[in-house]
Image (cartoon, grey):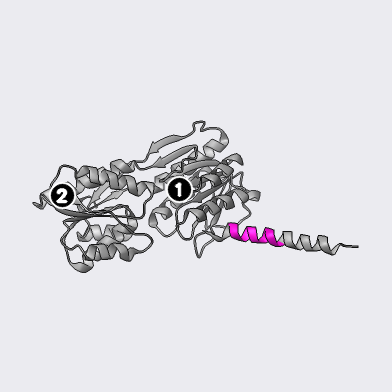
Amino acid sequence: MVSYKNTRYSIFALGAMLLTALLLFAGCGGPKERADVVVRGGSGATGAPKATDTKANAKYTVYLITMDQGSPFWQQIDAGCRQAVDEMGDIAYKWIAPRNHASREQGECIDQAVAAGANAIVLSAISPTETNENLKRAAAAGVKIVYVDAAATVEGVATLMTDNLLAGRIAGETMQKALAAAGIRSGEIGLAAMGKNQNATLRDQGFREAFRGTGFTVAPTVYLDNDRQNIKNFVRDHPDYVGFFGSNGQTTFAIAEQVKESGIKPVVIGFDTADFTMQMLQEGVIYATLQQLPTKMGLDGLTIAVKALKGEFKETNVKIDMGVNVITKDKL
């Protein structure tokens, strides 16, 4: 005879397991309107992404986990990872990210990758500390961790990123040259950032350092906070500012859009090379934009992750500066 008590507890346990699984996977998403699993065999054959059993068809499973999937910057990192998959072969690859640019959700993405059998994770960390427990569990499971663009404080194989303090200084020096060429020797400058993350803080610091001891004042930083209108309002409300710096792609987009709509002529320095940013550069709305190398970050990051799995890359916690280029209209 089956005990009612045991049956009740079994049903309860099964329900709890299902609830845990739902919570684990709720915050994480893959690219929309396409399969997000790519399997490349040893031949390196190319073709459309295939939703395939990754474990059955590849020796290594590698996940890319970014801060979100909406920005062209992350899409370029993904493109670099896919290039590495094509070149190296025998790799199952999947790109996932939080739906709401939240550290808690990114932690769930890390847990999801580990549960799905990831051998390595290429990660751009939203916070340097808030996913540390998830990363420690991944490392304890033998997962190799490579950081691109932004790192957590848990030790990884390598970190590939822009020297953001230097990039901020270069942005400030570039704006100074443009202001000097226009005969402007003083005034207020606006600075916009995505949020209070490590990259934004360092770019902010470097930019401000470039203007110390000059006749210019850099206003308090305004943050996007997932609402582009915050930045547009900031530009609209300060038509007298002599310059604006957007320290990432999305803030650059919002600044340029509002500058064009308002018909004002400040010096605008942007970050990254989305299509709209390059169009605004061509039209003269933006004076210059700083180009990172996201495709190379993805290519080199995934390559290092797989080499670490093979025992060919033996170093740990290596810092690799990916560099930055200044693009002006005359360089297009």
**Which SS class for mark 1?**
loop
CA–CA distance between discs 2 and 1?
34 Å
Q: Position of residue 173 (x, y in %)?
A: 20, 44
| Point 24% across, 57% down: residue | 281
From this viewpoint, is residue 16 visible? yes
Q: Give the mark toward the camera: 2 or 1.
A: 2
Relative depth, front residue between 288 and 155: 155
Type of amino acid under label 2: Phe
x then y, percent, for residue 237: 21, 65
Residue at image position (61%, 56%) is: 52
Residue that extends furthest to the left in the rendered view of this protein: 183
Determine the main secondary structure of the stretch shown in magenta.
helix
Tell me the tag on residue 168: none
Q: Is label 2 in a helix, a strand or a loop?
A: strand
Q: Which residue is mark 2?
A: 216
- Give the residues in magenta: 15-24
Q: Are marks 2 and 1 in contact (CB under 8 Å)?
A: no
Residue farthest along the top direction in this orientation? 314
Residue 274 seen in render: no
Q: Quadrant of residue 9?
A: bottom right
Relative image position of residue 253 (x, y in whole percent): 30, 60
| Residue located farthest toward the bottom when viewing the structure as drawn | 261
Query: The N terminus is located in which quarter?
Result: bottom right
The magenta stretch spans residue 308: no
Residue 170 pos. (x, y %): 24, 44
Which one is earlier in the sequence, the residue at label 2 or at label 1? 1
Disc 1 crowd rating (10 Å Cα; few below 14, some 14-19, many 20+) is many
* 208 horizontally vs 6: left or right: left
Q: Furthest-front residue in view?
A: 5
| Disc 1: which residue | 125
Q: Nearer the viewer, residue 137 or 87?
A: 137
The amino acid marked with disc number 1 is Ala
